[in-house]
Amino acid sequence: MSRLLVIGCGGVASVAIRKCCQNSGIFSEIMIASRRKEKCDALKAKLQGTTGTRIDTAQVDGNCAKEVISLIRAYKPDAVLNVALPYQDLTIMDACLATGTDYIDTANYEPEDTNDPHWRRMYEKRCRELGFTALFDYSWQWDYRERFEKAGITALLGSGFDPGVTGVFSAYALKHYFDEIHTIDILDCNGGDHGYPFATNFNPEINLREVSSPGSYWEDGRWIETKPVELKSRYDFPQVGVKDMYLLHHEEIESLAKNIPGVKRIRFFMTFGQSYLTHMKCLENVGLLSTSPVLYEGREIVPIQFLKALLPDPAALGPRTVGKTNIGCIFTGIKYGKEKSIYIYNVCDHQACYREVESQAVSYTTGVPAMIGAMMVVTGQWKKPGVFNVEEFDPDPYMEALNRWGLPWLVCENPAPVKVWRADEE
Ligand code: NDP
């Protein structure tokens, strides 16, 4: 029996909240708090009467630590699940520290304003020292480790699918299938079709920032950076079929490189159709992906935020998205002195997700692990003082929970390897 404060009420949050309500034996009380209380109230109205979980709602600005602290002091949750945006990670962690409350999120910190001088100084230092230029990295949240240790509270970072389940798959592979893991290829395939010429499956601002950035991968102890979508591959995904995919920078590469001992190479690939890439390039060329404010009729607007307002709301894609996602990891390494490879993956059907929780599979595959991460912490199965990524805990109870709560996984031996070439060679 526990009390959870959920911050955010968008696509991912709605699934996490519905899953908490299905799991009322653990989550007996939740508070939904977001920038707009009316959204929280609307979700509460839909769920009330269908669940044993008591639901309260509140308005909160996650950018304001003082507001989050007041809300935590008033509600007294056992943990805070941050499913707002990565921009709010640090203020919500500050509030958890101030109140001695455990913290869970699904995405690592990135600044809303990339012109902030403090962030820019740190960013330039990191680019020089570490060698990758993505706008997001774990250093900001890992810096809280000692303070969380001293406060005796847990921060569980990145409990979505990727990052999240992909890290748990890695810990599981290491525990049960390998003595040493040498390579990890993370493959994120969305074989779904929403019927729009262009839309993103989660927050457009975060998604477009990620895909239009330089790619990078980890090899032999260092980062190798590529141009955006420079490296391409094609894979025949079980239950989905053949899809083109591109190498991207992704945050779990950073944590897995630290936490999987001896790993030699980690890469991340995401599938995109040509139409998505052509639209994105065109929007970039006209300046609509810029995060720097421009003056329009005497008012400052941030182009990518304006674009977000024009694009379909990912939370509204559910009824019209058909097809399946397949997300997983291919591992190679050694067991009992012999080379081996396995593929662990989950397949999720967009329409089945919609029938269950009124969301498409991208929100579903993130919202379910968000609930499971919160469950691991509030039940004490994954609880120790400090700041941790998911692969630092015992993967077994999380893997069991994935099967139970809607994301069953499969292990296949000797999968086809991933071959990579330059996209402009085709
Ligand atoms: P949405 O834009 O749909 O939802 C974000 C929610 O946060 C909205 O309800 C929004 O309010 C609220 N919010 C925004 N700013 C504030 C603020 N200052 N204070 C309080 N609430 C705020 O995003 P998604 O649901 O698609 O994504 C949620 C998170 O999940 C993101 O961090 C994203 O990066 C992460 N994610 C992780 C994945 C993974 O596999 N690990 C995959 C996909 C997403 P309002 O409704 O008013 O706009």
Image: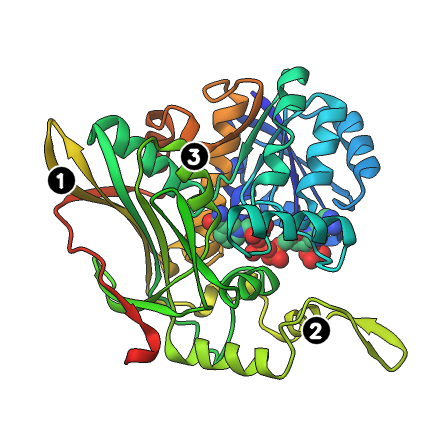
Instruction: Give the alpha-carbon distance from disc 1 to disc 3, as whole Å.
Output: 22 Å
Lower sequence index among marks 2 and 1: 2
Q: Report x, y in % for residue 59.
A: 78, 45
Height in image: 193 above or below 405? below
Q: Nearer the viewer, residue 16 or 341?
A: 341
Say whether mark 3 is within 8 Å of ligand 1.
no
Which residue type does callout 1 highlight? Lys
Quarter-of-image position of residue 232: bottom left
Is there CB contact under 8 Å for labels 1 and 3?
A: no
Taking the image as shown, residue 246 lies to the left or right of residue 307, namely: left
- The residue nearer to you, when weighing 28 against 78, is 78
- Judged left or right of residue 388, residue 46 is right
Say if residue 37 shows up in the picture.
Answer: no
Which residue in the structure is indicated by mark 1? 340
Image quadrant where residue 334 sits:
top left
- Residue at coordinates 31% horizontally, 33% vertically from top-left? 262
Residue topped by disc 2: 303
Q: Which of marks 1 and 3 is nearer the N terminus?
A: 3
Eye-nearest disc, 2 or 1: 1
Q: In the shown orientation, is residue 393 left or right of residue 423?
A: right
Q: Say which of 206 and 200 sits in front.
A: 206
The Cα–Cα distance between marks 2 and 1, rounded to whole angstroms, is: 48 Å
| Three-letter residue code for mark 3 | Lys
Q: Mark 3 points at which residue?
A: 258
- At x 45%, y 68%, the residue is 227
Judged from the image, the secondary structure of the residue bearing numbered disc 2 is: helix
Q: Position of residue 387 (x, y in %)?
A: 57, 28
Q: Quadrant of residue 246?
A: bottom left
The vertical placement of 25 against 6, above or below, is: above
Element at label 1: strand
User: Furthest-front residue in view?
Assistant: 128
The answer to which of 131 and 104 lies nearer the viewer is 131
